[in-house]
Amino acid sequence: MHYKYLNKTFCFFIILFLFAGCVVKNSPFYSKKKDRLVLGKKDNPIIVKLENVNYKTYLYGCSDYSYTLTQDSKEYGKLFVEEIELGFNCTWNGLPSGFFEDNFRSNLKLNDVETVEHIDIDRYSFKTYKVNEQYYSIIYTYIGRKDRFIVDYEGKLYNKLLKSFDKNYVNKYINKKRFYKFYDDSLVRKNILNHYFTLERFNSRD
């Protein structure tokens, strides 16, 4: 009976995995149909209309729905976005923002990166970094089991979003030389090697 149960359970998860890979979902954060991001406060949202979008979905293990996208528009310039939604039985093995920042630096082989600005407001974390006298910005936000990372090369979205929370905010780095080396990677894709998140272990009866 024990082996029959295991076989049925295994088959169920295989079917669930395959089905989930075929499902196209729209996140409340990103609408694929409308090609836009919705950021900031509910009563004063920042709507980002995306252009020239390259959209990729990822499914691995206990992640429910994850994607990356890149875009290049006149208003905001180049943006990279990754959203990761973990299943109820899945947990991060550290700070998601730390994993993303480390992978960004490792993927682009960056040394001597300095954090020159770090502001946390209402489930948003804004950071600007300096490398080789050039600057780039990363926005991290989360809600429930969803984590979102935005690399803002020009800092324009970063600036507008921060000012929606704090109208007195002054960006000291937006007019400085910006860092444009292209990043196109995924924590979900690399999870099999780096174990950023794992399936939680539950005690079960024999």
Image (cartoon, rainbow, N blue to C red):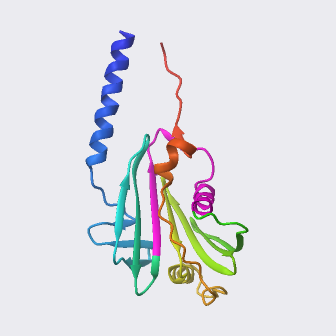
Any magenta on residue 78?
Answer: no
Residue 125: percent from the left, percent from the top?
60, 68
Task: Examine the rendering and report whether any part of residue 114 can be seen.
Answer: yes
Q: Residue at x 61, y 61 (%)?
A: 101
User: In the current view of this chain or complex, which residue is farthest to the top?
Assistant: 1
- 7 is higher (above) or lower (below) than 87: above
Instruction: Examine the image and state in which quarter residue 173 appears.
Output: bottom right
User: In the current view of this chain or complex, which residue is farthest to the front?
Assistant: 109
Instruction: Examine the image and state in which quarter residue 47 appears.
Output: bottom left
- 72 is higher (above) or lower (below) than 185: below
- 98 is higher (above) or lower (below) than 115: above
Residue 51: percent from the left, percent from the top?
34, 78
Q: Nearer the viewer, residue 12 or 179?
A: 179
Residue 204: percent from the left, percent from the top?
49, 20
In which quadrant is the N terminus drawn?
top left
- Span shown in magenta: 79-107
Does residue 106 appear to the left or right of 187 in the view shown? right
Q: Residue at x 60, y 55 (%)?
A: 99
- 140 is higher (above) or lower (below) than 60: below
Any magenta on residue 81?
Answer: yes
Does residue 70 appear to the left or right of 19 in the view shown? right
Instruction: Examine the image and state in which quarter residue 71 appears.
Output: bottom left
Q: Nearer the viewer, residue 132 or 114?
A: 132
Task: Examine the rendering and report whether any part of residue 40 can be seen.
Answer: no
Residue 48: percent from the left, percent from the top?
40, 78
Q: Residue at x 65, y 80 (%)?
A: 134
Across the whole image, how many numbered discs are drawn on residues?
0
